[in-house]
């Protein structure tokens, strides 16, 4: 499972714990197992932690992402200095317009906002939560080319111990190694049990950014009325996501 809850506060969070991993994993993998994740592990083995730390050391000032949504605008610092590969993947997707027109597909009050699935350009899509960037695509990170695997996933970057505190941006995944791509979530409370270094649960969701302004907008989205699938009843659209 991608998300394991400790001391859940209400039944909806218990249900979310059981479904969020399946929601982000394509149906073919749910049926046959994660062969894709196995291939990703083999590719990720080529990228060692010392190399990741070296890329981090080369990074300079961190970029700011501007999230222009149908409910208002918020900004976030992207941790290029701490999480260069994950940050560069996000920045590449933002700069190519990947996130523009996509809707928040899962919102749980008192937990988080999930975003980044290309299928969620249609706010009513049943495939929302299963999409990724194009398989085999690539991006640059401090002058180096990083290839996404056949499923559009990037290597896990479990090197920084920033906790899943309110306002942090964290990578979503299926619970399998190296299964994060374009989807991420914004924490609205301190979800320390999602930290890769927590040790009390199998959840491993690395933080790669934090809201610097507009947290009131984030909280407003977090309070929006949702349907049985935790999707906002009134769609919340990302008009544009730009890097400055």
Image: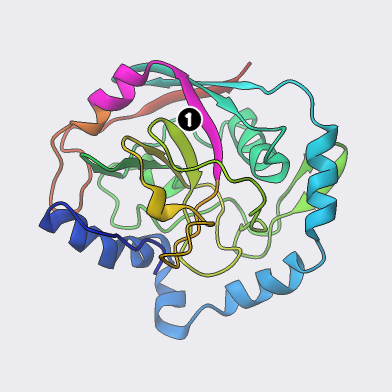
Which class describes the residues within 10 Å of circle 1: few (<14), some (14-19), or many (20+)? Answer: many
Looking at this rendering, what residue extends furthest in the bottom direction?
32
Q: Is residue 79 magenta?
A: no
**Residue 197 locus on image (x, y percent):** 54, 57
Front one among 10 and 69: 10
| Quarter of the image with the N terminus in it | bottom left
The answer to whether residue 224 is above or below residue 32 is above
Q: Residue at x 44, y 62 (%)?
A: 203
With respect to residue 76, does 187 lie above or below? below
Instruction: List x then y, in percent, for residue 30.
Output: 40, 77
Mark 1 secondary-structure assignment: loop
Task: Quickly name the residue at label 1.
Answer: 100
Residue at 15% x, 41% y is 226
Which residue sits at x=28%, y=30%? 236
Describe residue 212's horizontal placement relative to residue 46 as left or right: left
Of 181 and 102, the residue lying toward us:
181
**Depth order, front residue of 210/184:** 210
Which quadrant is the C terminus positioned in?
Answer: top right
Q: Residue 81, how many percent across, how many down? A: 72, 32
For the rendered model, the colour scheme is rainbow
Instruction: Name the residue at 36% across, 20% down.
Output: 215
What segment is highlighted magenta in the picture?
207-220
User: Quick check: can you spot residue 179?
Assistant: yes
Would residue 193 be found to the left or right of residue 44 on screen? left
**Residue 141 visible:** no
185 left or right, relative to 126: right
215 drawn magenta: yes
């Amino acid at each position: 499972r991608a998300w394991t809850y400790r001391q859940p506060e209400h039944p909806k969070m218990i249900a979310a714990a059981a479904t969020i991993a399946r929601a982000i994993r394509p149906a073919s993998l749910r049926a046959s197992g994660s062969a894709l994740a196995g291939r990703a592990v083999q590719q990720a083995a080529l990228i060692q932690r010392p190399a990741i730390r070296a890329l981090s050391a080369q990074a300079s000032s961190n970029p700011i992402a501007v999230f222009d949504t149908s409910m208002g605008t918020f900004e976030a610092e992207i941790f290029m200095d701490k999480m260069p590969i994950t940050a560069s993947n996000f920045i590449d997707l933002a700069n190519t317009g990947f996130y523009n027109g996509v809707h928040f597909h899962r919102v749980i009050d008192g937990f988080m906002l999930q975003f980044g699935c290309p299928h969620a350009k249609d706010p009513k899509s049943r495939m929302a939560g299963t999409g990724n960037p194009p398989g085999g695509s690539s991006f640059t990170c401090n002058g180096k080319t990083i290839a996404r695997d056949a499923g559009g996933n990037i290597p896990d970057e479990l090197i920084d111990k920033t906790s899943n505190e309110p306002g942090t941006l964290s990578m979503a995944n299926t619970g399998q190694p190296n299964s994060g791509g374009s989807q991420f979530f914004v924490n609205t409370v301190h979800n320390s049990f999602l930290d890769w270094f927590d040790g009390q649960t199998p959840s491993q969701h690395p933080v790669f950014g934090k809201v610097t302004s507009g947290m009131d907008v984030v909280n407003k989205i977090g309070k929006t009325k949702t349907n049985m699938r935790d999707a906002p009843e009134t769609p919340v659209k990302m008009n544009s996501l730009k890097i400055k």
